[in-house]
């Protein structure tokens, strides 16, 4: 632990100028320093046993409400606390669970995680996807707090890295008391990295369970009213885009605008601060646009470009989309979630780099329920083909939604496994030893 602390401190010192610049430029890293660096998590006055759930950012936070509801049914005497890493995740968690239940996760310094665990007093720590920190897991083991990893996936890249560092990573994986993997393949990978097989189940993807399929949901209706739309406009929504993708999306939209002059463009950058550069580009080209953060409503009678520079609205925009593009898929990020638009019957496209959602992409492509595009020309062709053929567009959207509906059920399996772990952790341990 001392060696890890030293490595972390050295890394922090090296990154300090960059962190200061982010704080000045974007207002990042201003909140929760006591919680992050010293583990000063808020005390829980309820006296109930606590389940601590950690979600890194907005995407992971959005998975938790449905799961917590399932857990409350099985664990009525427990309280639930939620930690996040990012400030956007913190704001989203506060909006969903209330400020008294939310805190910033401690950085993986031994003193910070030790104090946080003692203050939160969890009966169980639940981590999402692949958020594994050595000191946190070691301290949980020392304080007899079981750890569950939910919605777990293991990409090819991560798997190769952990295998190369097996001399170090095996100690991390053996400390996991439960792994709810998204697929059987991922389950096998966790087993090969050191998690006893008796502690692993293939529970499915929680994002399928949390996906909204109702275009009349309140958050969608409220957005229509907030921006002054009629709700019948044809919108091309590009969500979670990176800066290099904004230009591709714009060029594709401009190339089909002559055929479809009523098609409006809505761009939702992955990070709101990236909207500045995109808006400067639009202004430089003399293209009219509106920023979501501006006061007032857009004129629905006038074709426009909407740049959404606020956090947390993308799910509602997917509910208004006629057709869509999912960003983070043209570069090295590995793609963002295409589950939300698919669940809302949006004919969806994305780039070729989608390893973060490999299994979902495989299902969608096998069912001819999505399209891979490589550049602006491909994206324009996708728009043209679908907009000229409403019947094709409807059939594609139906196939996508069916995949999401058929893949639901992970929340029940995950909650049941967690309840079993809390009820009899020794039985799970016995299963693990027997399997080993």
Image: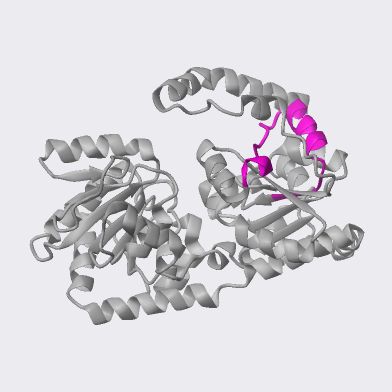
The answer to whether residue 392 is visible is yes
Q: Quadrant of residue 271?
A: top left
- Depth check, front residue: 286 or 10: 286
Q: Residue at x 57, y 40 (%)?
A: 90
Magenta region? 98-126
Task: Please state, as top left, top right, bottom left or bottom right, where the N terminus lies in the image.
Answer: top right
Residue 326, x across and y down, in percent: 36, 57
- Depth check, front residue: 191 or 14: 14
Report the side of 184 relative to 264 (left or right).
right
Look at the image and say whether residue 111 sits in the magenta stretch: yes
Please say if 214 is above or below 156: below
Q: Residue at x 24, y 60 (%)?
A: 379
Task: Please state, as top left, top right, bottom left or bottom right, where the C terminus lies in the image.
Answer: bottom right
Q: Residue at x 20, y 78 (%)?
A: 389
Q: Quadrant of residue 8?
A: top right
Q: Quadrant of residue 195?
A: bottom right
Q: Residue at x 28, y 35 (%)?
A: 276
Report the side of 126 relative to 310 (left or right).
right
Look at the image and say whether residue 79 sits in the magenta stretch: no
The answer to whether residue 153 is visible is no
- Depth check, front residue: 223 or 183: 223
Report the side of 413 relative to 292 (left or right).
right
Report the side of 407 relative to 342 (left or right).
right
Residue 103, x across and y down, in percent: 65, 38
- Depth check, front residue: 81 or 225: 225
Residue 33, x across and y down, in percent: 62, 25
Rendered image coloring scheme: one colour
């Amino acid at each position: 632990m001392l060696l890890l602390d030293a490595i972390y401190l050295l890394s922090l010192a090296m990154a300090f100028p960059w962190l200061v610049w982010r704080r000045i430029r974007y207002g990042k890293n201003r909140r929760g320093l006591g919680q992050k660096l010293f583990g000063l998590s808020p005390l829980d006055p309820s006296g109930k046993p606590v389940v601590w759930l950690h979600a890194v950012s907005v995407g992971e936070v959005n998975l938790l409400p449905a799961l917590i509801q399932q857990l409350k049914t099985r664990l009525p005497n427990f309280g639930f606390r939620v930690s996040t890493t990012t400030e956007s995740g913190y704001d989203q968690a506060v909006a969903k669970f209330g400020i008294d239940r939310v805190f910033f996760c401690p950085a993986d310094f031994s003193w910070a995680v030790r104090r946080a665990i003692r203050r939160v007093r969890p009966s169980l720590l639940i981590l999402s996807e692949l958020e594994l920190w050595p000191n946190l897991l070691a301290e949980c083991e020392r304080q007899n707090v079981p750890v569950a990893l939910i919605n777990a996936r293991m990409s090819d890249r991560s798997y190769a890295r952990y295998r190369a560092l097996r001399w170090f990573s095996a100690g991390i994986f053996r400390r996991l008391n439960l792994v709810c993997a998204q697929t059987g393949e991922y389950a096998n990978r966790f087993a090969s990295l050191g998690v006893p097989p008796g502690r692993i189940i293939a529970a499915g993807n929680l994002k399928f369970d949390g996906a909204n399929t109702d275009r009349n949901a309140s958050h969608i209706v409220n957005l229509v009213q907030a921006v002054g739309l009629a709700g019948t406009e044809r919108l091309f929504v590009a969500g979670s885009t990176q800066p290099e993708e904004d230009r591709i999306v714009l060029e594709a939209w401009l190339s089909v605008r002559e055929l479809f002059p009523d098609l409006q463009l809505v761009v939702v950058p992955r990070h709101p601060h990236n909207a500045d550069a995109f808006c400067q580009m639009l202004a430089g080209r003399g293209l009219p646009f509106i920023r979501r953060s501006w006061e007032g409503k857009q004129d629905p009678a006038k074709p426009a470009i909407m740049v959404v520079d606020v956090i947390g609205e993308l799910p509602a925009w997917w509910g208004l989309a006629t057709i869509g593009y999912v960003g983070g898929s043209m570069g090295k990020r590995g793609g963002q979630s295409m589950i939300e638009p698919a669940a809302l019957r949006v004919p969806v496209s994305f780039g070729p780099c989608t390893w973060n959602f490999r299994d979902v992409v495989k299902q969608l492509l096998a069912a001819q329920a999505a399209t891979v595009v490589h550049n602006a020309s491909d994206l324009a062709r996708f728009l043209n083909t679908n907009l000229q053929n409403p019947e094709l567009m409807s059939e594609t959207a139906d196939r996508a939604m069916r995949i999401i509906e058929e893949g639901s059920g992970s929340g029940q399996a995950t909650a049941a496994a967690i309840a079993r772990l809390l009820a009899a952790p020794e039985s799970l341990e016995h299963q693990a030893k027997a399997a080993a």
